[in-house]
Image: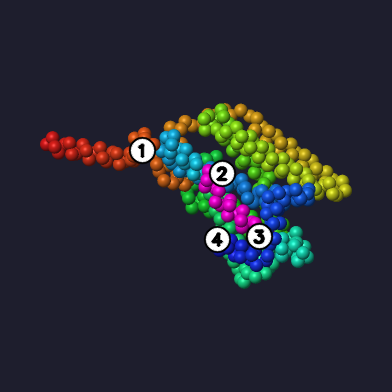
Amino acid sequence: FVGIMSIALWTEMSFVGVETGELWRGWIYGFVDVTSDDIFSITGILGAIVMPHNLYLHTAACQTRRVVREEIPVKEAVRWSSLEPVLPVLVSFFVNMAVIAIAAETVNGTADEPEKVGLTDFCYYFQKLKGGCVLWGIALLAAGQSSAITTTYTGQYIMDGFLHMRLPTWARAVLTRLVAIAPCVIVSAAFPTKLNHMVNIVNSALSFLLPFAFTPLVKYTTSVEYMGRYAPPLWERYLLRGAAVFVYLLNAISLSAPAGGFFGFIFKEPMSAKNGFYALLMILVQLFYFWWNLYTMIKPISTKMMPLEEERPYDEAEFAITSDFGDLICDGNANGCCARRSQMSRIERDSDLAVSLIDE
């Protein structure tokens, strides 16, 4: 469904007649036209694309893929795991490009309040695409299911890895799905006319939460003391650390900016007891946000990375173990021949039987 909608959006974009030069100018260096009023939209885009729970999910998914614990297979697994997120990001990039191009040509200058147009009514501005709202609704349903599934998987991984909660599969699925979906249903039913703005708030909140997943990930993966010879090159380490600082600064500014969507409204209104309370709360959140990010970045890592030859331990009830290659035995060559221990035991057993028959 999402693929069909992607094709439909690009077809509609071709009918609308987008100015290609302006489109690419906006994507390549459109940031030169950004003002302080756009920070809420920027954080919303960041949170919608780089969702913090997906960082946990991809890390957990990589850990469940057991590989032969040798240098070449591990490097190959790391390479393919690094390439894995590229295709979804590229697809989402071109889908977003089509949505923004259509909105720029049809919504801007047509709608009475273009800033309030969102997911719930965007399809009304399709010009040539027959049945566009039906396709749009199906695509949103599929995307919503995808988001709910990823958050469910992430919750299950966290329950297993951090909280060490061992629940039956059906109980974990029901619990995590209810926690993810029930608040959305309640809020949607209570505020049916404000869904577009609520989606933007949720995306900005995801951006605010992003450092709590991204900063520790950068901390460990760029540490030479922890990663050893597997640490990335110097330029990549500085690039990742700079990205972590940028994400923190962007969200810290959005917390207090007048157009940031959080506490900035207190600078637009007269001072009152209510605004004084919100100002104090803003200061406390900013101090905690700064302290946590700084502490995470400068605190020395006290643990050591697990040796390459040592396989990560798995509990019997742990969630989502995929192909089990943990019991492989290889001959040590780059193109090594591998066999399972169960197969080797059977071969040895059959050999012993053959020798016994010959002796008899």
Query: Residue 102, relative to residue 176: is it above or below?
Result: below
Measure the C-alpha gap from mark 1 to mark 4: 40 Å
Specify few, some or many for label 1: CA neighbours under 10 Å numbering under 14, 14-19, or 20 or more. Answer: few
Percent from the top left, x then y, of residue 340?
Answer: 34, 41
Q: Is residue 345 visible?
A: yes
* Residue sitting at x 62%, y 47%: 50
* Kind of element beneath mark 2: helix
Q: Earlier in the sequence, mark 2 or mark 1?
A: 2
What's drawn in magenta, residue-wise? 82-101
The Cα atoms of the two marked residues, 4 and 2, are separated by 26 Å
Q: Which of the two residues, 120 or 231, is positioned nearer the viewer here?
A: 231
Q: Are marks 2 and 1 in contact (CB under 8 Å)?
A: no
Proximity of marks 4 and 2: CB atoms separated by less than 8 Å: no
> Looking at the rendered structure, which numbered label has been put on residue 336?
1
- Judge by depth and name the residue closer to the eye, 358 or 223: 223
* Above or below, 185 relative to 49: below
Secondary structure found at label 1: loop
Mark number displayed over residue 99 = 3
